Image (cartoon, grey):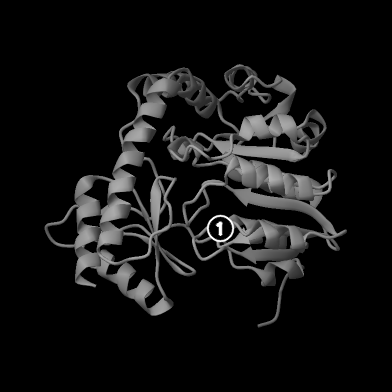
Amino acid sequence: MSKRFLLRDALAQFPPYVPGKPPVSAPGLTPYKLSSNEHHLPPLPSVVEALTAASAVPGNYPDPSAGRLVADIAAHLDVDAAEVVPGAGASEVLSALTNITLEAGTSVVYPWPSFEMYPILASARGAEKRPVALLDNGRHDFQGLSAAIDDTTRLVLLCSPNNPTGPTITAAELDGFMAEVPPEVIVVLDEAYMEFATDAEAADGVAAFRRHPNLVLARTFSKAHGLAGLRVGFGIADAEIAGALRQVIAPFSVTAAAQAAAVESLAKVDEVAVRAKEIAAVRDRFAQDLRDLGFTVPDAQGNYVWVALDAEAAVAFEGACAEVAVAVRRLQGGVRVSIGPDEALDRVLKVAAEL
């Protein structure tokens, strides 16, 4: 088919991002969506109040600097406000990081499978993609990641807990890897699910950031804070990198409602943490139940579990869940199941037992 318009050739190199499927209806069953790692508990009442109040005048632009939110994040993490960069979810921060580092003739290194946006963003910038296969236990292969870096590498992406497989990166792994990376190469630690992690050896991103100036943290209010629909996240970066990020992030990308909700949720961070650990406890039980049925489930540290399956079994698992009105996420190498209400997880376990 011929092209009618002058579009970039790079568009042919990657498919668009495919979000998690919605559940299909089944007679007599409440549908559940366990395909997008959404927070299934109801929002905190004070966050809803803040959101409602901030939405009262939709005709005004939001604060372009998100000053109150930036100040509160900086105080909460004990970093300088100049090192905090807000964005429309961590995805916008990741996109901006690829925008300030990647172009034709450069390369980006990342684990795989991991967050599906990594190769999409790399292709969009015309950079060479260098995915490094995970180890059999779902963890990053740091030896392989180090070997993939060369003079063309401008960016390295890490994910802890890794989405979709679940394990965290330990402090020893991160420090050892950073010692191998040239100091001018930017390394991103994507911590979208860090609040759910219970691994005592998991790397402390902020502490590592203080030790390694070329380390950038990407965090979000979408997951543990339950604000995915509002699109608000942030990066923590050296002031020079942060300044470059602000140059390419669209102005007013974080709405007034999103800023207000995030400020209030951060003020209730202790409650957010308690809820995250409640979800983590359910996650651990669910993961063990699947293991007891004979499935391979790596260490789960996000608000999801990864069921390692071959392609045929993954299709069967996803289809059987759909028949009982539960949507799960089939990806390369298996199926990811988000933690949701007990009824939904019980249906998944029944499907697993029957398979």
Residue nearer the viewer, 298 or 82:
298
Q: Is residue 86 visible?
A: no
Question: Based on the displayed image, in which of its 4 quarters is residue 335 positioned?
Answer: bottom left
**Local crowd size for mark 1, using a 10 Å CA cut-off: few (<14), some (14–19), many (≥20):** many
- Left or right: where 43 falls relative to 241: left
Name the quarter where the N terminus is drawn.
Answer: bottom right
Identified at 20% across, 54% down, the residue is 346
**Residue drawn at (36%, 40%) of the image:** 280
Report whether residue 90 is seen: yes
Q: Residue at x 45, y 40 (%)?
A: 197
Task: In the rendered view, tell whether residue 230 sits above or below residue 289.
Answer: above
| Quarter holding residue 211 | top right
> Front-most of 304 and 226?
304
Q: Residue furthest left?
A: 28
Q: Residue at x 49, y 22 (%)?
A: 266
In the displayed structure, would residue 311 be above or below residue 189?
Answer: below
Q: Whole-percent x and y of residue 191?
A: 56, 41
Q: Secondary structure at mark 1?
A: loop
> Which quarter shows the C terminus?
bottom left
Q: Quadrant of residue 254?
A: top right
Decide if residue 290 is on the left or right side of residue 354: right
Residue type, mark 1 in image: Ser
Residue 343 image point, x, y percent? 19, 49
The front one of 203 and 195 is: 203
**Front in this rendered view, residue 109 or 123:** 109
Q: Position of residue 192 (x, y in %)?
A: 53, 41
Q: Which residue is mark 1?
A: 114
x and y percent of residue 241 in the render?
A: 79, 36
